[in-house]
Image: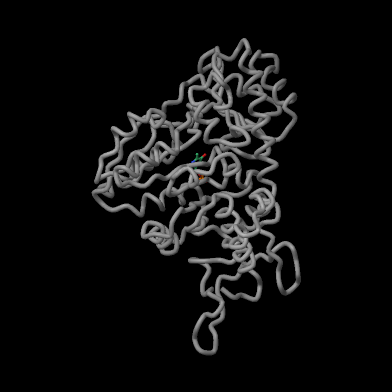
Amino acid sequence: MTHPNAPETAEDAAKDAGRTGFSPRSLAAQAMGGVDPVTRAVVAPLHVSTTFLRDPDNGYSSGFSYARPDNATVREAEAVLAMLEGAQAGAMLFGSGMAAATAIFGALEPGDHVVAPRVMYWALRRWLREELPRRSIGVDFADSTDLEALTAAIRPGRTRLVWIETPGNPLWTVTDIAAAAEAAHAAGAVLAVDSTAASPVHTRPLALGADLVMHSATKILNGHSDVVAGVVAGARDDALWRRIAAIRAGGGAILGPFEAYLLMRSLRTLHLRAAAQSAGALALAERLSGHGHVAEVLYPGLPSHPGHAIARRQMEGGFGGMLSIRVTGGEAGAVAAAARVRLWKRATSLGGVESLIEHRASIEGEGSPCPPDLLRLSTGIESVDDLFSDLDAALRGAHG
Ligand SMILES: *Cc1c(COP(=O)(O)O)cnc(C)c1O
């Protein structure tokens, strides 16, 4: 690809990444290190044009013709994400995490079968239940943390896709990615992983055998609660990958360039944010474990968590910024505590630099495994002491 304003430099830098041997952290900090060849700017220009001039011979030598199928700024953010995930096929950005996930399921054929986990993002579970039957695609939900149960749900020859989410929202259950990939592959299926909670800093599903990895980039990838976006990264440029690309281009689900620009800006600090949020979540999980108003702390970084051993194997540098607590006063106690916080923000979503608290059962629909006394905590980058004392006061009823 030759283009005067450098979208190719990020791509070339992505190709160079393997050769230079620099770490993902270094490459992300520089958004792949591309430099605009016209101005020598170290931050690439934002490409907002929806259309591109034809050449005198009627061709499109830049490789760009119209902004729905492709955009240069989007491509640059995709190059960073592909590098972070070690994705040979590359990464594709979508207008939301749901658009990314549903593009994967959209690539299936009538008669196909899907296995999904019991513990997963609620809106996607609802979409699978409502939309897959309309497309004559079967879906079964299995306990993905139990390899036997997962394997039993897979129908060799019919199951085309096994979907897992780890850590799984909102209980932070841990699924063994390598084992799930083996089980899926043995039956002729592919494994797709919703890795939103882990982020590529802590887990690289493709290196563990997964075929596709999806993120809600709205969450820690962007991390500033100001962009809605989603991404799919692929291990191989195969028929399934090209079908997902065709669905994005044809369905018009591409991310806008402004959002891609903001996302790329955020990715430069991803490693710093993820490390701080993970360390904060672990400290909170430990301090809340002995709390008189907390019945249980759900965090994969705690040795008491049932998924801890697998998490230690497949997660690096921390266990993520997400934890949940079960409050001793039941549902009423949980809702009351969430209403009393002063520093934590009582809002949905996760992964941002500001800490969020949410009574999760209020939002999860049918089929949710979320207990009514559960509060979901998304750890930001504030002082952990402040976060703990605010939560402690809210739990004890000390705040107004
Ligand atoms: C938020 C979220 C999604 C959906 O992403 P959107 O960007 O909100 O569409 C999917 N999976 C997980 C784990 C999420 O947290």
Quarter occupied by residue 260: bottom right
Quarter occupied by residue 236: bottom left
**Residue at the top extreme of this rendering:** 292
What residue appears at the point 54 percent right and 85 percent down from the top-left corner? 55
- Camera-side residue of 226 and 294: 294
In the rendered view, tell whether residue 166 sits above or below residue 385: below
Point out residue 343 in the picture as x, y percentages from the top left corner: 71, 28
What residue appears at the point 28 percent right and 53 percent down from the top-left corner? 109
- Camera-side residue of 287 and 306: 306
Q: How many marks?
A: 0
Point out residue 384 in the picture as x, y percentages from the top left corner: 72, 27
Point out residue 104 in the picture as x, y percentages from the top left corner: 40, 51
Q: In this image, 356 relative to 243: left or right?
A: right
In the picture, the quarter occupied by the C terminus is top right
What residue appears at the point 70 percent right and 22 percent down from the top-left corner? 388
The coloring applied to the image is one colour
- Camera-side residue of 116 and 201: 201
**Residue at the bottom extreme of this rendering:** 56
- Camera-side residue of 176 and 270: 176
Point out residue 90 in the picture as x, y percentages from the top left corner: 51, 58
Q: In this image, 112 relative to 172: left or right?
A: left
Quarter occupied by residue 71: bottom right
In the picture, the quarter occupied by the N terminus is bottom right
Q: In this image, 245 relative to 393: left or right?
A: left
